[in-house]
Image (tube, grey):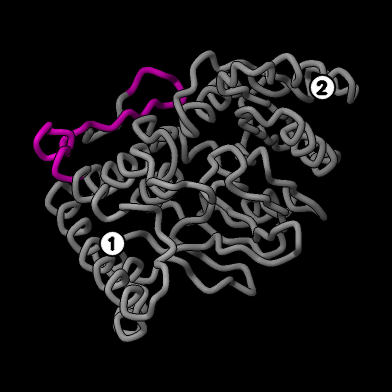
């Protein structure tokens, strides 16, 4: 019987040196695994592609082990990963399509058997379609990377950050306590996640309507609705820096693409009416948080004019009809739209 294979996708955007370090970590972790690593430069236009090609040569990696691709267009996280996935599935590994696709961020560094742990878990749990890793920072501190799906209730709780509300809505809180053992969760952060090929053949690839954020949440929800579970695998440990390409930690104003992604997630998965309720709940919760911060003389920690920007964005979406935007999901064979879109 042929050995199962893994296709690893690492998406680069203007972080060539760090991406090569991430690739080196993946190469080391896949030393006993049959597979290939595709580094996709998402049209950085800063010399990244050339630096990546030169770096792969300097490391001495063969073309059948590590390959650098140029997407030609920065369509976002989902589109860039889709570009690599389609290339990998089309060209195969050892003459056939890979069995698993491993998505690894350019600022994520698997270690101590992290990739093998995900692979082994999926091999021994045939009803599990996806597996995510335990993520920690460079200082060893664990990151919140296991979650519930967002809802109207979670929008209120997450925005309000108020003890009585959080206790009342504790079963809706999106971030889960960091699991101490392997367990099923709704969705996991896309910094390190392995996906069974059959899942993507059934539900399609990332929805390319999302430029950045919510795309992995959406993919996990579509997989769950198709009957595939996602497991958080505690034995798979990955170091992650976080927000290097996106600059999220330094946002002064919330970018429109984040608001677009949030709205599209709710509209495409739950309908326009539900999206309106979720936005109203967030605005109400955010108002409670702002009032408490004002009374206590503290900051909410949100970007400037966050609630105003969200309200204006929602109103504009209604007026322009963007609340009815269709999905943009491409299947691995490239010729089937998402059913029901």
Disc 2 crowd rating (10 Å Cα; few below 14, some 14-19, many 20+) is: some
Tag 1–tag 2 contact (CB < 8 Å) = no
Point out residue 166 in the picture as x, y percentages from the top left corner: 35, 79
**Does dot 1 land on a helix, a strand or a loop?**
loop
Q: Find out whether residue 286 is within the magenta segment.
A: no
Residue at 56 percent of width and 23 percent of height: 42
Quarter-of-image position of residue 322: top left
Residue at 63 percent of width and 61 percent of height: 233
**Does dot 2 land on a helix, a strand or a loop?**
helix
Counting residues from the N terminus, which is met first, the one under dot 1 or under dot 2?
2
Residue at 41 percent of width and 64 percent of height: 148
Residue at 89 percent of width and 25 percent of height: 59
In this rendering, is residue 8 above or below 232?
A: above
Point out residue 294 in the picture as x, y percentages from the top left corner: 32, 74
Query: Label 1 vs label 2: CA separation?
Result: 43 Å
Q: Is residue 200 left or right of residue 328?
A: right
Point out residue 251 in the picture as x, y percentages from the top left corner: 47, 46
Residue nearer the viewer, 81 or 242: 242
Residue 56, numbered label: 2
The part of the chain drawn in magenta is 314-336
Residue 151, numbered label: 1
Say if residue 1 shows up in the picture: no
């Amino acid at each position: 019987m042929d050995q199962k294979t893994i296709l690893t996708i690492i998406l680069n955007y203007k972080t060539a040196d760090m991406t090569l370090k991430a690739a080196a970590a993946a190469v080391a972790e896949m030393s006993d695994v049959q597979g290939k690593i595709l580094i996709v430069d998402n049209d950085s236009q800063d010399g990244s592609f050339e630096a990546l090609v030169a770096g792969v040569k300097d490391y001495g990696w063969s073309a059948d082990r590590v390959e650098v691709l140029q997407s030609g267009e920065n369509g976002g996280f989902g589109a860039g990963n889709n570009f690599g996935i389609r290339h990998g599935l089309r060209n195969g590994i050892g003459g056939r399509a890979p069995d698993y696709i491993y998505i690894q961020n350019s600022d994520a560094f698997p270690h101590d058997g992290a990739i093998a742990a995900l692979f082994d878990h999926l091999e021994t749990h045939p009803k599990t379609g996806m597996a995510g890793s335990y993520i920690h920072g460079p200082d060893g501190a664990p990151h919140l990377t296991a979650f519930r799906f967002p809802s109207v209730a979670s929008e209120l709780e997450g925005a309000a950050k108020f003890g009585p509300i959080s206790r009342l809505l504790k079963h809706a809180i999106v971030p889960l306590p960091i699991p101490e053992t392997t367990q099923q969760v709704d969705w996991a952060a896309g910094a390190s996640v392995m996906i069974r090929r059959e899942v993507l053949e059934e539900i399609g690839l990332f929805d390319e309507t999302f430029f950045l954020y919510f795309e992995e949440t959406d993919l996990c929800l579509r997989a769950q609705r198709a009957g595939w579970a996602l497991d958080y695998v505690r034995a798979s440990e990955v170091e992650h820096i976080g927000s290097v390409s996106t600059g999220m930690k330094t946002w002064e104003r919330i970018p429109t693409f984040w608001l677009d992604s949030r709205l599209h997630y709710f509209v495409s998965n739950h309908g326009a009416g539900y999206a309106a309720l979720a936005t109203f709940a967030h605005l109400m919760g955010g108002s409670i948080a702002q009032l408490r911060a004002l009374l206590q003389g503290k900051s909410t920690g949100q970007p400037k004019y966050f609630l105003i920007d969200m309200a204006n964005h929602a109103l504009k979406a209604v007026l322009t009809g963007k609340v009815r935007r269709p999905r943009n999901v491409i299947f691995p064979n490239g010729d089937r739209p998402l059913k029901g879109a």
